[in-house]
Amino acid sequence: MLVLTRRINESIVINDDISVLVVEIRGDRVRLGIEAPKDVTVHRKEVYDVIKEDVPEKPKKKRVAIVS
């Protein structure tokens, strides 16, 4: 894991097209602004985990042997 230190109004760039800006620091909370292409989904980790739990697994294909 890469750990970076940033101050308010400082940002990091990921893959040339995603930017994460530190908007505000208040106590133990940090507000981040994220700019990303529309095809990139951005979720808080706890929301992402719930989404992944709710997605049903793809049904496994049954293989049938044909005997003649």
Image (cartoon, rainbow, N blue to C red):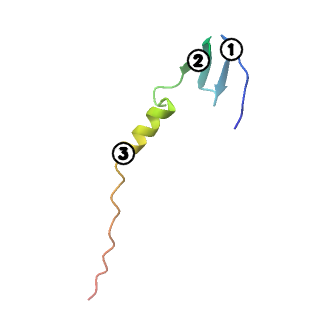
Amino acid type for the residue under numbered disc 2: Arg
Query: Which residue does the numbered mark 2 point to in the structure image?
Result: 29
Would you place residue 3 above or below residue 63 in this image? above
Q: How far apart in space, not on screen, are marks 2 and 3 (Cα)? A: 30 Å
Q: What element carries label 2?
A: strand
Mark 2–mark 1 Cα distance, whole angstroms, equals 16 Å
Residue 30: % across, % down: 60, 17
Residue that mark 3 sits on:
55
| Residue nearest the viewer, comparing 36 with 30 | 30
Residue type at numbered disc 1: Glu
Mark 2 crowd level (few <14, some 14–19, many ≥20, 10 Å Cα):
few
Q: Name the residue under label 1.
A: 10
State the SS at label 3: loop
Residue positioned 64% across, 27% down in the render: 16
Residue at the extreme left: 68
Amino acid carrying mark 3 in the image: Val
Between 51 and 26, the one lying in front of the other is: 26
Residue 50 bears which disc, if any?
Answer: none
> Decide: marks 2, 3 in contact (CB < 8 A)?
no
